[in-house]
Image (cartoon, helix red, strand yellow):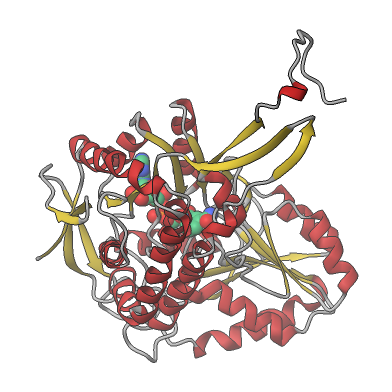
Amino acid sequence: MNRISHWINGTVVAGTSGKSGKVFNPATGEQSAAVDFASVAEVDAAVANAVAAFPAWRATNLSRRAEVMFHMRELVDVNRKEIAAMLSAEHGKVLSDALGEVARGLENIEYACGIPNLLKGGYSEQASAGVDVYNIRQPLGVVAGITPFNFPAMVPMWMFANALGCGNTFILKPSEKDPSVTMFIAELLKQAGLPDGCFNVVHGDKVAVDRILDHPDIAAISFVGSTPIAKYIYETGTRNGKRVQALGGAKNHMLVLPDADLNMAADAAVSAAYGSAGERCMAISVLLAHDSIADALISKIEERIPNITVGAGDDPTSEMGPLITGEHRDKVATYIAGATQEGATLVVDGRTNVPAQGFYLKPSLIDNVAPGMKCYDDEIFGPVLSVVRVKSYDEGVQLINDNLYGNGTAIFTRDGGAARQFQFDINVGMVGINVPVPVPVSYYSFGGWKSSLFGDQHMYGPEGINFYTRSKVVTSRWPDPRTSTVDLGFPQNR
Ligand code: NAD
């Protein structure tokens, strides 16, 4: 049995806790590896190495830090297929989707290649007579990332590229469900020239996470995962004096107005609901269809569903793979079963004709859904699209704004005025106008509102640089005998 161990101080370190987790190939349902779970002492060892590596890495000049990121960019680029294959083998996503994940992660490494420019401060000459004021951005120290199963390569890249570029050292606690790719990333960072100890991976469960939350030498934590855990991480981490950004779950609504191009809207809804088997925090899980076009739109979606090829991620003909675990597949199936009991209409039932092996469900479509039903209220995180019929734009906006989550949303319309009003009205962090999965490019920042994000700073992009640095303002005067007097008044500039 393949064993996945920790990465500490630039090398693989076998776990000693005696605890491990099972990693599956979701396409076959078979266990493919066991992953060591870190004890408190093992997390402490990783943090001690990161603490030791920090002074030299922080002092490394900006050009050299950028050079490491440029090397890493090249290494990820030439290893795209290998990384995608690893993602597919443990997560289950199809290769084309896995390659997309790598490409979107790579954008964040490319952004960090510009770190000398990103860390430039401001300078005000002659703020007072002979006095200049400037600000500098300095790293925090050791920072940690705790990441979810659904983007095992991209989400760590959202974090470590900027964190390391800013001069911090990093502890990653990846999802225990698909951990292999982070070990490969660690090797690539070493090959790219990152000094040992700057990037460490500890695998594990709540024990490792709780030690990260408690550890006095960890200055900041970036988390991505489900809302209850995000809230716990934010509350515990901030109580312990750490800077925390904790991104949570989602229920993303797509509002389709009567003037929308219905073929385009149907293509977008199918792609965004069933891509990656719906296991994306930016997946569309609710379609808000205006009454006047709802029947037509639903039949267009229904027509498209049988054309989706469901199969193993490594089969190039597959468009949608299995779910992450058998347990998760069964949980998603309960929402499909419950929908009819709650009064909704099951238009397409994805529980039928699924492959016998592996953790599969096919796409499901549920009509006449309403708030109060479990399939509306909960984040399902599977290939299930719920349709809520709305009588007006206002009713659609109200539903989105009343929702617990505020990660992503989209409007489909040809009316520029309606689209502009939507971006003004909507209480959601990432908005698509005829774009169903509006994941921001790396030079903007990613993050939702409401229960989709706890903390002040969104992830990556300019807010990522803010998160991983502290600003220091220096007020400076060089001795000049002409301006020197005794003055006991409070310093003022006029
Ligand atoms: P999860 O919350 O179960 O796990 C995330 C991380 O937290 C993992 O590393 C896990 O080991 C750890 N963890 C789990 N339970 C814990 C506990 N009780 N105490 C301490 N640590 C714990 O999430 P997941 O199932 O891996 O990922 C899917 C979720 O992530 C979905 O809710 C999805 O919407 C969300 N997500 C959000 C974003 C975003 O940007 N907002 C992006 C991707 C995924």
- The residue furthest front is 481
Q: Is 133 positioned to the left or the right of 378 in the image?
A: right
Q: Is 354 positioned to the left or the right of 208 in the image?
A: right
Query: Which residue is at 80% across, 71% downward?
Result: 291
Q: Is 244 positioned to the left or the right of 291 in the image?
A: left
Q: Nearer the viewer, residue 79 or 136?
A: 136
Measured as percent of width and height from the top left, residue 216 is found at 35, 28
Q: How many numbered marks does the figure carry?
A: 0
Measured as percent of width and height from the top left, residue 416 is found at 87, 73
- When the figure is inspected, residue 369 is found, relative to residue 315, above or below; the finding is above
Q: Nearer the viewer, residue 15 or 35?
A: 15
Measured as percent of width and height from the top left, residue 28 is found at 24, 76
**Which image quadrant is residue 95 in?**
bottom left
- The residue furthest right is 417
Q: Is 51 positioned to the left or the right of 424 in the image?
A: left
Q: Nearer the viewer, residue 52 or 443?
A: 52
Query: Which residue is at 47% across, 27% downward?
Result: 241
**Which image quadrant is residue 7 in?**
bottom left
- When the figure is inspected, residue 205 is found, relative to residue 363, above or below; the finding is above
Q: Nearer the viewer, residue 395 or 480?
A: 480
Residue 392 shows up from this direction? no
